[in-house]
Image (tube, grey):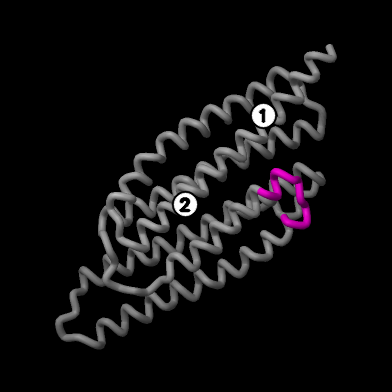
Amino acid sequence: MTMARESYREDLATLRADVLALGADVVAQLDRGLDALEAGDEDLAETVVANDEAINERYLTLESECIDLFALQQPVASDLRFIAASFKILTDLERVGDLATNFGHYTRATGESHLDTVDVRAIGAETVDLVEAALDAYEREDTDLCRRIAERDDEVDALCRTASERVVRDLIGAEAASDAWDAEAVMDDVSRALLTVRDLERVGDHAVNVAARTLYMADNDDALLY
């Protein structure tokens, strides 16, 4: 019985380590997607898109491991919260990976932007930092950090609103400034810029989700869940 319990504790520790490892790879994928988008680097964009399948496969494997822990081990309340939170966090990480892949698709489709509207790297750096902080909170079960992440996401949302407004202003300015205004080209750039801002905001939302699930896991506190 003691050996079985020790094996179970090792399984839980392995799950946490595997979630963190997937998180680190998702953060790297996000960084590459932002680099590709900022530079218009279509080769790097291809790498980002190609990496998505491996992330999805690892996500499904870890999700299955969580289900096995639910079904086979009959976890007590605290362990149940840990497994359930990890299960949900995996979904958030997979979706961040999808958003990173979106950046690869945007770059691959349009190349370098002709409308220098959104500082992708500056806003992206904030969202990357939020995801990294959320993973740190999960690793250490740091409830104070969970709450700070939720507060910082409000700042990211404000940056994204400002960026979206600037996109619209630049569109109007481009139309007014030139008789040779290429509506189709500008609209392509505007669409990509707005999609990028939307996706950056969603990355921040997923970081908050990770923090919210960690807070519930650690303190049985659902204050950040929504």
When the figure is inspected, residue 47 is found, relative to residue 168, above or below; the finding is above
23 or 189: nearer the viewer: 23
**Which residue sits at x=66%, y=29%?**
14
Q: Position of residue 198 (x, y in %)?
A: 46, 61
Residue for badge 2: 30
- What number of labels is visible? 2
Residue for badge 1: 14
Farthest residue, direction bottom: 177
Farthest residue, direction right: 2
* The image quarter in which residue 87 lies: top right
Farthest residue, direction left: 180
* The image quarter in which residue 127 lies: bottom right
Separation (CA) of disc 2 from disc 1: 24 Å
User: Which numbered disc flags the more N-terminal residue, 2 or 1?
Assistant: 1
194 in the magenta segment: no
Which amino acid type is shown beneath numbered disc 1? Answer: Thr
When the figure is inspected, residue 79 is found, relative to residue 215, above or below; the finding is above
* The image quarter in which residue 103 lies: bottom left
> Horizontally, is 158 left or right of 47 in the view?
right
142 in the magenta segment: yes
Q: On residue 40, which mark appears?
A: none
**Which residue sits at x=80%, y=18%?**
5
**Highlighted magenta segment, given as a residue range:** 136-145
Q: Position of residue 13 (x, y in %)?
A: 71, 30
